[in-house]
Amino acid sequence: MNKSLWLSALLLLALSSCLKSNDDEEQVYYHDTALTSFKLGTLKRILHTTSSSGEDSTYSSTVLGAAYAFTIDQQKGLVYNVDSLPVGTDVSKVIFTASTKNSGSLVLNLRTKDGQRDSLKVYSTTDSIDFTNPVEFRVYNQSGTTYRKYMVEVRAHKQNGNIFRWKQVTLTADEKAALLAQRTQPTDVSSVIGGDALDTAAEWLPTSDLNLVSMPLKTNADALRKVLVGNRSVETHPLDTAAMVWCKIVDPDALNQPWFFYTPTSSNRYQLPRMKNLQVAVYGDWLVAIGGAGLGACTQQPYKHFYVSEDNGLTWHRSASIVFPSGFTAEGTYALVADNDKNLWLIDEASGTAWRGYLNKMKWEEK
């Protein structure tokens, strides 16, 4: 029996028990159908780790597949997850649930084990399917006379998104100047504040190592969040251990708002250290900062850590992902720049030695 005859027989057999109800009433059958939902079950994930002795090992965990929504493009017949599954997720044995319009019959067009022929398989919620490559779904109407085809792709990341990669590069004088020009480092705080109001005393304003960055608001595409970071005078404020961080919302549709100050308090254990030559850049949704030796009461070693803020400058944490590159020495004065290609640049302002780096997940593009 060829494939089409086999499938027709299978569909007729499945429908025969539904031809009449218990009351022997005539049933209505539909000639159109479609895939209406697709949801993954729980998936296995293999992770790699290194022991304290330096030996590599693996361990397994699980991924809640239902947390990853699938797009069904009815016009193109494509089904895919925009947010890829985490790296290490096993997509070779996937259990899923699917729904169809008008009780259409779902059939999977799989490859035989030898990879030479197609093999049609009626969908079952208990079957484990290999989605290493896209799988063809066919949704047949109730009469079995036609079907709609979909290519289903289960996407999983191939790289760890939190790995940061550096590469040393040689810059021309013009390239170096163009990168350094992307920083906004005012020399006078009054040029930043202008006539704007402050929510606290002006004595808390930074006066040196000034950095001014802007970030779009997620809730309003037309509004910006300006963040001012810098240090107070060591002579006037020798006991400071943290940098001064101020913030202002700029909304063209609202009244001019004041600058508000993230007041250093003992309850906030994650403040940005008061470092010489402080550098701040916007990288994705993060603020990233580096600096030289600590000033005043701050005993921070020069260029020891990258500091990352995920809450617009309120708290700063030592980054576990972004570390200084191989060959880097703390002797020098360094600039930190983020470009439009999702790279971070670390540039020795005297020698011109430079490193270009990126976080893997910053380079992932939506398919």
Image (tube, grey):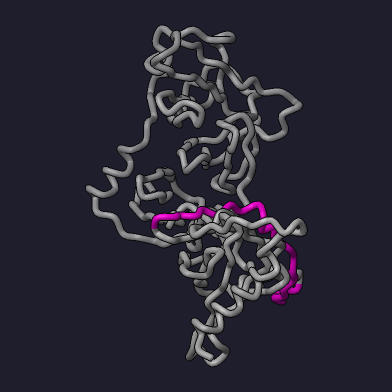
The answer, for residue 45, to whether it is visible in the render is no
Residue 232 is situated, as x and y percent measured from the top left of the image, at: 54, 22
For the point 51% across and 74% down, the residue is 133
The answer, for residue 208, to whether it is visible in the render is yes
Relative to 355, residue 4 above or below: below
For the point 49% across and 81% down, the residue is 4
Q: Nearer the viewer, residue 311 or 334?
A: 311
Q: In the image, which residues are magenta?
A: 53-75
Residue 226 is situated, as x and y percent measured from the top left of the image, at: 46, 25
For the point 44% across and 30% down, the residue is 216
Q: What is the quadrant of the C terminus in the image?
A: bottom left
Residue 192 is situated, as x and y percent measured from the top left of the image, at: 40, 18
Relative to 164, residue 248 above or below: above
Residue reaching furthest to the left? 174
Residue 55 is a magenta residue: yes
Q: Nearer the viewer, residue 235 or 153?
A: 153
Residue 19 is situated, as x and y percent measured from the top left of the image, at: 66, 64
Q: Nearer the viewer, residue 353 or 104?
A: 104
Residue reaching furthest to the front? 24
For the point 49% across and 60% down, the residue is 31
Q: Locate residue 356: give its quadrant.
A: bottom left
